[in-house]
């Protein structure tokens, strides 16, 4: 039987507004983890997509004067184009208006209905239009009001369908207590445990069609559509093949499930992914639970990045200005997974110049140029009797590769990058201390020059291979220039006698004056 792939998914993005930097961060993070697994020889399946139903989309469509389906389709196209531009290379694409998804969600609803987990009840209360949920006194602030985070709050009375969450709450509390790896990082797991202990009540999973038409119809009560979160959360299972029909071209659920990393932002852990989602699975008869990887937020000047605040950061424009690879690198380098960070375009620029152009780009450029100048581009193997400084760099490189993988294993991409850049700094230091330009002038130093060049090519190659998951296209170019096209080995000692170098061309050119604006 083939090994179960590492199954990674992200939240599916709302199609009520175009993508911003927060969406880009999450996709790139998942893509980097995916690429890292794949490059180390492990099978991976990366699922992502868009959340197309619900009141937010219906409202945005109304404002734009188009049908919700058309609105969702246009925004979906913008997300897809951005992922292509940012080299976010997913295996499965989830769109919640997909008939295969709709059919599976309706089956689950019918199943829950038939086993008595759904009931109909009349409820009156305050309802947040923005968050698409009923509010209770718990949601009131210290002044006894519903704060601005809830947007427009209206009082409504209506009959709806409810899901017996409370029946499964003891099971969930137990699951959280006995599975410390359910939520990463651990402090978010504690937050969830506290929320589960406090939460009571069931979940309203329907909306009357009179109020919201843009959703999946309840199969047992045609006057209602299902709550957008119930629909959206199911995507992780339906697009992994759960309840898929023969010939659906969806994956084999049994071979893929459970999900090893659900990449989500901290705002959607409680209650959606930490409470509703595991209970939905459990009630549907899916016993194996996913693991949640909860990241922090990119803020702008300390405030939330949001369209409504008028401070949206457009990742598309940033990629045009600095290049997709620079944006990917910055988004991975300047945040600690799990924590928040402040987005700063100046830092993106500075990182591009310092880390990519000066450190990595320059190392490869001068290594290849010297190899061509002093040896016509054909290298000898490093001698068996190694110099002390060559051994030191080799040890540092091997250690950097080990530390890189340890950090990636716990999703700390910025620490992995730090390890790779320590190797780059050490290799640049080695250029200065070994001074190949002096060695080249002295025929007695010929063997030493061979060694220095071989060690530099080895260090450059390893650094480029380590950086590959984060900057795949630039790394491919660097590796080709080093004569190692497609070689992503992260072991030291790949170079053999007679190795041919490629052409040195700057991969990270200086940003032009126009983009200094
Ligand atoms: N559609 C729901 C998720 C349904 S999953 C079954 C949703 N969509 S969203 O478009 O609002 O957010 C998508 C993801 O982007 C979420 O994981 C969210 O946390 C993340 N981010 C949104 N803004 C963000 C930042 N400013 N920074 C980092 N991530 C942020 O929620």
Image (cartoon, rainbow, N blue to C red):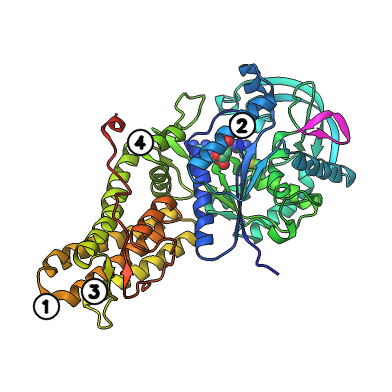
* Position in image of residue 8 (x %, y %): 60, 53
CA gap, disc 2 and disc 3: 56 Å
For the point 54% across and 30% down, which residue is it?
18
Which of 494/100 is in front?
Answer: 494
Label 3 packing within 10 angstroms: few (<14), some (14-19), many (20+): many
Residue of label 3? 451
Image quadrant assignment for residue 382: bottom left
Which secondary structure, mark 3?
helix
Residue of label 1? 444
* Position in image of residue 26 (x %, y %): 52, 44
Q: Earlier in the sequence, mark 4 or mark 3?
A: 4
CA gap, disc 4 and disc 3: 41 Å
Residue of label 4? 345
Q: Quadrant of ligand 1?
A: top right
Image quadrant assignment for residue 286: bottom right
For the point 27% across and 70% down, which residue is it?
379
For the point 51% across and 27% down, which residue is it?
307
Disc 1 + disc 2, Cβ < 8 Å: no
- Residue 15 bears which disc, if any? 2
Give the extent of the magenta segment.
216-226
Of tags 4 and 1, the one toward the viewer is 1
Name the main secondary structure of what is drawn in magenta: strand
Image quadrant assignment for residue 488: bottom left
Which secondary structure, mark 1?
helix
- Residue 112 bears which disc, if any? none
Of tags 1 and 2, the one toward the viewer is 1
Q: Earlier in the sequence, mark 2 or mark 4?
A: 2
Q: Earlier in the sequence, mark 3 or mark 1?
A: 1
Label 2 packing within 10 angstroms: few (<14), some (14-19), many (20+): many
Of tags 4 and 3, the one toward the viewer is 3
């Amino acid at each position: 039987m083939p090994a179960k792939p590492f199954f990674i998914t992200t939240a599916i993005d709302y199609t009520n507004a175009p993508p911003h930097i927060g969406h880009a961060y999450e996709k790139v993070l998942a893509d980097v983890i995916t690429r890292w697994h794949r490059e180390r020889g492990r099978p991976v399946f990366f699922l992502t997509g868009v959340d197309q139903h619900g009141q937010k989309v219906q409202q945005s469509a109304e404002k734009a004067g188009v049908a919700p389906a058309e609105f969702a389709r246009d925004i979906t196209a913008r997300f897809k184009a951005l992922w292509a531009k940012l080299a976010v290379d997913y295996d499965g694409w989830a769109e919640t208006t997909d008939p295969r998804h709709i059919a599976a969600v309706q089956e689950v609803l019918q199943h829950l209905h038939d086993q008595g987990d759904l009931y109909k009840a009349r409820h009156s209360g305050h309802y947040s239009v923005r968050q698409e949920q009923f509010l209770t006194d718990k949601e009131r602030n210290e002044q006894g009001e519903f704060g601005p985070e809830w947007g427009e709050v209206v009082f409504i009375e209506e009959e709806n369908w409810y899901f017996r969450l409370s029946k499964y709450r003891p099971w969930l509390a137990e699951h959280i207590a006995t599975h410390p790896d359910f939520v990463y990082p651990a402090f978010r797991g504690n937050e969830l445990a506290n929320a589960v202990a406090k939460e009571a009540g069931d979940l309203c999973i329907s909306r009357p069609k009179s109020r919201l038409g843009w959703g999946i119809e309840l199969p047992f009560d045609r006057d209602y559509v299902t709550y957008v979160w119930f629909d959206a959360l199911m995507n992780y299972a339906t697009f992994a093949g759960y309840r898929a029909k023969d010939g659906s071209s969806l994956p084999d659920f049994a071979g893929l499930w459970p999900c090893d990393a659900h990449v989500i932002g901290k705002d959607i852990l409680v209650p959606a992914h930490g409470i509703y989602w595991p209970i939905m699975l459990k009630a549907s008869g899916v016993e194996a639970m996913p693991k949640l990887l909860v990241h922090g937020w990119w803020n702008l000047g300390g405030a939330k990045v949001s369209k409504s605040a008028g401070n949206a950061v457009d990742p598309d424009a940033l990629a045009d200005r600095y290049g997709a690879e620079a944006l990917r690198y910055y988004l991975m380098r300047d945040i600690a997974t799990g924590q928040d960070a402040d987005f700063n375009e100046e830092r993106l620029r500075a990182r591009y110049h310092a880390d990519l152009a000066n450190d990595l780009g320059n190392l490869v450029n001068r290594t290849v140029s010297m190899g061509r100048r002093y040896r016509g581009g054909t290298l000898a193997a490093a001698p068996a009797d190694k110099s002390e400084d060559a051994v030191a760099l080799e040890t540092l490189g091997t250690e950097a590769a080990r530390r890189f993988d340890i950090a990636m294993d716990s999703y700390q991409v910025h620490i992995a990058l730090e390890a790779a850049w320590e190797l780059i700094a050490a290799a640049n230091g080695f250029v200065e201390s070994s001074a190949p330009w002096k060695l080249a002038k002295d025929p007695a130093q010929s063997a030493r020059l061979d060694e220095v060049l071989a060690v530099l090519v080895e260090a450059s190659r390893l650094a480029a291979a380590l950086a590959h998951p984060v900057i795949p296209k630039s790394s491919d170019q660097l590796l080709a220039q080093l004569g190692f096209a497609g070689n992503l080995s992260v072991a030291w000692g790949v170079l053999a006698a007679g190795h041919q170098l490629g052409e040195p061309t700057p991969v990270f050119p200086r940003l032009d004056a126009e983009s200094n604006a």
